[in-house]
Amino acid sequence: MSTIEKALSQLEAARRDAPEDDGQKTVERAGAEADAAGAEQAAAAGSGDPVVVHIPWDALHAQGFLTPAVPRSVIAEEFRGIKRPLLKNIAGMSPTPIANPNLIMVTSALQGDGKTFSSINLAVSIAMEQDKTVLFVDADVLKATAGHLLGVPRGTPGLNDILREEVVPEEVILHTSMAKLRVLPAGTPDEHATELLASETMHQFMLELAARYPDRVIVFDSPPLLLTTEAGVLASFMGQIMFVAAADITPQHAVQEALEHIGPDKMVAVMLNRASRRRMSLFGKGFGYGYGYGYGYGYGQGSRTLAAEAADEAAARAMNQ
């Protein structure tokens, strides 16, 4: 029996002996499941079987994420409304043409605004569509939180390795236990990771993704716009951008400054996260969308006037409550 097989046997025994916790798994349990999945993936790779990432749905559900097992939850309904304008733009139904509309970047001004939570939920929601497949890219390469939450062990080869031209995409794009969802991990840690994101190699890779998979939606979890200059460069490669602001957390000036890092020709959706039902009802008025679960949605293109107004409104309400 190999070392990996012995480890898997020990993991299975530990799972059988462990007491139940009523389904409320912690973030640490999610990390443990990801590492266990990594061992399983290594064993599969060694045996020649296809490598599949087993998404820890129970752990994600316990943390409030959207999961396919509960398709009629409040948050599932929220993201049905959030994704619809994005998908219409991909289908060519936008007021003006959008270059590479299937490249969608989810970002924020600062850490802690909820962009990773939102990007994973958006990817899962789109993957639940009948005619869409999704490639989720963990482009926040310094933290690599999104991939780990989805069951990918940290350090798994991915985006960084592609940008260093050490692997080709087909070698590191992973299938998952959700049939229509693929994951491109952040990759092997690199001290020059943020510079790699702003490189011409990254630009060419984005163009290749958009052209090679026109029927696929590519969702990027990006670094916050105010913490790295590379995030602004990454935004320039995208067709659509979903900007997440957190009620009671994101300062108004941070929202305004972050939006200045996005080119004026980009389609920008502004989403208010963690807001009360009452505030969301007010926020939605005038912008077309309001979500009681905690999401507001403003949409704009060109001068980004509507998106900027939505962001100002979101931040102002967050500051004044």
Image: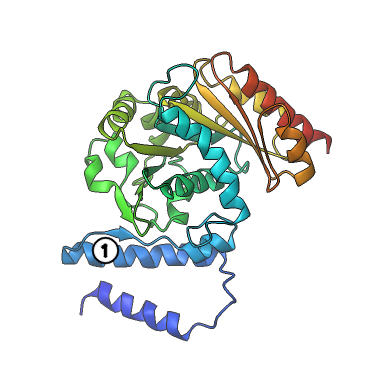
Element under disc 1: helix
Toward the bottom, the furthest residue is 17
The answer to whether residue 103 is visible is yes
Above or below for 40 versus 278: below
Q: Amino acid at mark 1?
A: Ala
Identify the residue shown where x is 32% and y is 45%. Answer: 158
Marks counted in the figure total 1
Percent across and percent down for residue 99 are: 39, 21
Q: Position of residue 318 (x, y in %)?
A: 76, 36
**Residue 123 vertical position relative to residue 150 in the rendered view, above or below:** above
Residue 224 visible, this orientation: no
The colour scheme of the drawn protein is rainbow
Residue at image point 49% right, 33% down:
86
**Dividing the picture into quarters, in which one does residue 10 lie?**
bottom left
Position of the N terminus by quadrant: bottom left
The residue under label 1 is 42
Q: Is residue 274 left or right of residue 117?
A: right
